[in-house]
Image (tube, rainbow, N blue to C red):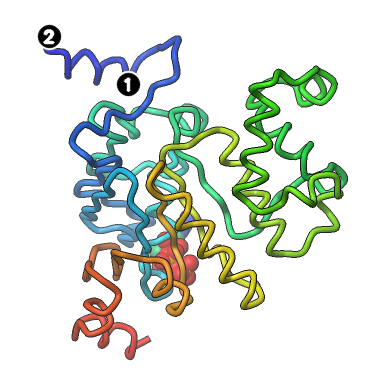
Amino acid sequence: MTARLIDRALGRGIRSQPLKPDVSHNIILYLEDITVSFDGFRALNALNLYIEAGELRCIIGPNGAGKTTMMDVITGKTRPDAGSAWFGQTIDLLAMREPAIAEAGIGRKFQKPTVFGSHTVFENLELAMAGDKSPWKILFAKLSGEQLGRIEQVLETIGLTHERDRDAGSLSHGQKQWLEIGMLLMQDPQLLLVDEPVAGMTPQETERTAELLVSLAGQRSVVVVEHDMDFVRSIARKVTVLHEGSVLAEGSIDQVQNDQKVVEVYLGE
Ligand SMILES: Nc1ncnc2c1ncn2[C@@H]1O[C@H](COP(=O)(O)OP(=O)(O)OP(=O)(O)O)[C@@H](O)[C@H]1O
């Protein structure tokens, strides 16, 4: 068996160490010919999508284009009828369940923040570090210097250092969203999927979120699904437009906004 086949076999099988994506070809996510049908209706239709290592990609598309379904396939929530999904060169996402996919390094931020309101910002990050260990154990255990350092680093990244002792429930909507991104960062994901991050945010919060997402890319890949075109313009280098379960256009925001097919799809909404 070649090394690649052994790696692939490991991706499917029992393992003692968490898998890390092999991005030696500079691609962190491969979706190829992914089709998902719901009662005969194709939510995804032979979708092909490639995300580069360190890239910040925005996914746009009219309602029902398949954006959520695509995220569901990547995270293992929905099984496609056909196609393949690889995390780097060696990790076969379609052979894994949701927790194993998260553990391999794919984090997903849903639209609605789900922080623990009666715990402080700091404790929320501590709890996020626990993974599948008992939350009580983590809250009452003494943190190692390394763990403390990681929490402080994440607090800095999400701009909540000065709010560390505040109950998460008393944060603004934007701050809660950043805390939840911070909770995902505690698991050090290599691919972060973010669903409509600026919905309901003030203009200042939106601007801060743009800076945060831009700062996260590079060390990891970030895929953002967003309807707010001004926001997309402010962060994206490359935009993918989905329509009827396939890629309609891909390129810079100017390229896709001037693409006749894209104009027709949005005008026809
Ligand atoms: N569980 C399901 N059962 C049946 N149909 C579904 C299911 N999930 C999604 N669909 C359909 O699949 C299509 C794609 O839905 P999806 O939610 O992926 O689109 P979207 O691009 O995320 O849309 P929006 O921007 O409105 O969130 C829609 O027509 C939707 O009604």
Image position of 34 (left or right of 134): left
Density class for disc 1 (Cα within 10 Å; few <14, some 14-19, many ≥20) is many
In which quadrant of this rendering is ligand 1 seen?
A: bottom left
User: From what the image shows, is residue 8 above or below residue 122?
Assistant: above
Identity of the residue drawn at 17% across and 19% down: 4
| Image-quadrant location for residue 268 | bottom left
Quadrant (top left/top right/bottom left/bottom right) for the C terminus: bottom left
Front-lying residue, 80 or 103: 103
Identity of the residue drawn at 30% across and 30% down: 92
Instruction: Measuring from the top left, give residue 151's x and y in whole percent.
Output: 67, 35
Q: Amino acid at mark 1?
A: Gly
Instruction: Measuring from the top left, give residue 138's x and y in whole percent.
Output: 77, 22
Instruction: Measuring from the top left, give residue 47's x and y in whole percent.
Output: 24, 55
User: From what the image shows, is residue 99 above or below residue 35?
Assistant: above
Q: Circle 2 is placed at which residue position?
A: 1
| Image-quadrant location for residue 248 | bottom left
Front-lying residue, 13 or 89: 89
Identity of the residue drawn at 50% across and 41% down: 107
Q: Amino acid at mark 2?
A: Met
Image position of 88 (left or right of 3): right
Q: Circle 1 is placed at which residue position?
A: 11
User: From what the image shows, is residue 42 above or below residue 160?
Assistant: below
Q: Secondary structure at mark 1?
A: helix
